[in-house]
Amino acid sequence: MLDTRYIWGLAAISWCLMIAIATRLTIFTGSSTERMFTNPFLDAAVVNFFLRKSVHLAAFGLLAILCWMALRGASFRFIKAWALASGYGLIDEWHQSFMPERTALFTDVLINAAGAALALLAVWAALFFLRKRSKKRPFA
């Protein structure tokens, strides 16, 4: 039987490939996505900014969780998962610096790392409360 760590590792690598492909697609550049939000009620640039940064948070948060799952049994699992996701966020921004229609921003690297940290914090909090709840005894 295949160890689930390999399955989660493959899922993390697949997600990295999906991020890399999305980075190369011009449909996901800032100017392209801003045109989608043009309307008379909201400033499209502001909506675009918050949506794009939210995608950074979510994409690298998911990557961190996939890495965390792949690292089952490893010491310093949360730190390693955060480092892998944040490191890939840095590599992704570096990759964007070579693309003429993209801009590589250090603030995006920080947002990627924050997304990874927030997702792992949510996992830790969920595990903490589940363990605390399972230790409670029913009333006699």
Image (cartoon, rainbow, N blue to C red):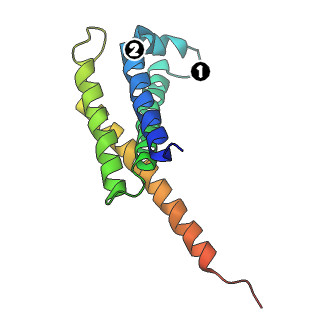
Residue ID for mark 2: 29
Q: State the SS at label 2.
A: loop
Is residue 113 shown above or below 106? Answer: below
**Residue 84, x across and y down, in percent:** 31, 42
Question: Could you tell me the amino acid type at mark 2?
Answer: Thr
Give 43 or 120, whichever is nearer the viewer.
120
**Residue 3, x across and y down, in percent:** 48, 46
- The residue drawn where x is 25% and y is 29% is 91
Estimate the spatial distance between the alpha carbons at disc 1 and disc 2, rounded to whole Å: 23 Å
Q: State the SS at label 1.
A: loop
- The residue drawn where x is 22% and y is 18% is 97
Residue at the far right: name it.
Answer: 140
**Residue 19, x across and y down, in percent:** 40, 25
Q: Quadrant of residue 26?
A: top left
- The residue drawn where x is 36% and y is 55% is 78
Q: Quadrant of residue 52?
A: top left
Residue at the far bottom: name it.
Answer: 140
Residue ID for mark 1: 41
Question: Could you tell me the amino acid type at mark 1?
Answer: Phe
**Residue 59, x across and y down, in percent:** 44, 34
Is residue 60 shown above or below 140? Answer: above
